[in-house]
Image (tube, rainbow, N blue to C red):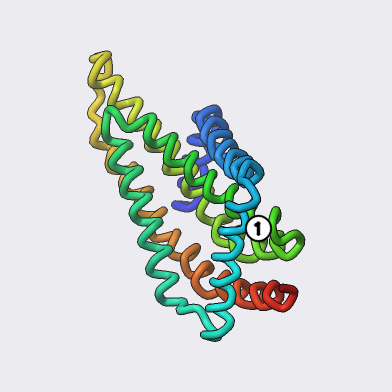
Amino acid sequence: MAKNGIFVTFKHHLKEYASLYIFVSVILLFGVIFGAIIVNSMNVSQKQDVLTFLTQFFGQVHNEGFVNGKDVFVTSYSTHLKFIALIWILGISVIGLPLIIILLFLKGLVIGFTVGFFVNQLGWNGMLLAFTTVFPQNIIVLPFYVLITVLAIQLSIRMIQKQFLKNDREPIIKQLISYTMIFTIAAMSLSIASLIEAYGSTYFLKVIGDLILKKN
């Protein structure tokens, strides 16, 4: 019964804020596209520098025989927690609205640049590398990032209305509590994405990295 109630509430939320979800998803998509454009705008020397660094990294992974999954998990999860905490803070501030949008755009840009560079420089191996090391964790990460971004924008707009329009007399504490609870759930859920990145993606990184080194 409780699960059905949560599902109905979330379905209603999606319907009510569908336009905001579309807007946020488009911002993320623009970031991905812009990241790919940056790759295409790089000159040969810049691409070669990045490719050399990537090849050296593959060589290091090959020589050491493993990537420390625990270190990758800690780094990945701490990055997610910092992002979530920053979005949470911006959501409860009046000036946070544009910064929330910029942060999500930059997240998309990083993904677009990474995938774009892999494919541009490594061809099919790069596509395979992106599919096995970038996509798996982001299947979990991106929906949660979109969700918390929408909630942060929604709350930030509410804060602006209360601060400047003075026509919102309803206490904000209830919304703030649910806002914090959802962010907490997102933070815990993203540990799964970090585990995938630490112990799944790093395995494929080594396997595909070895293939790339053999071809070079």
Q: Quadrant of the C terminus?
A: bottom right
Q: Position of residue 45 (x, y in %)?
A: 61, 53
Q: Is residue 200 visible?
A: no
Q: Which residue is mark 1?
A: 118
Q: Residue at x 40, y 74 (%)?
A: 71
Residue nearer the viewer, 13 or 157: 157
Q: Looking at the picture, how far across and down is residue 68, in whole percent? A: 45, 79
Dot 1: element: helix
32 left or right of 190? right
Query: Which residue appears at 76% of the width and 62% of the height?
Result: 124
Relative depth, front residue between 188 and 96: 96
Q: Is residue 120 above or below residue 73?
A: above
Task: Give percent across and percent down for residue 120.
Answer: 70, 53
Residue toward you, 116 or 167: 116
Give the residue type that dot 1 points to.
Phe
The residue sitting at 32% across, 32% down in the picture is 96
Image x and y of residue 61, in percent: 54, 78
Q: Is residue 190 above or below residue 58?
A: above
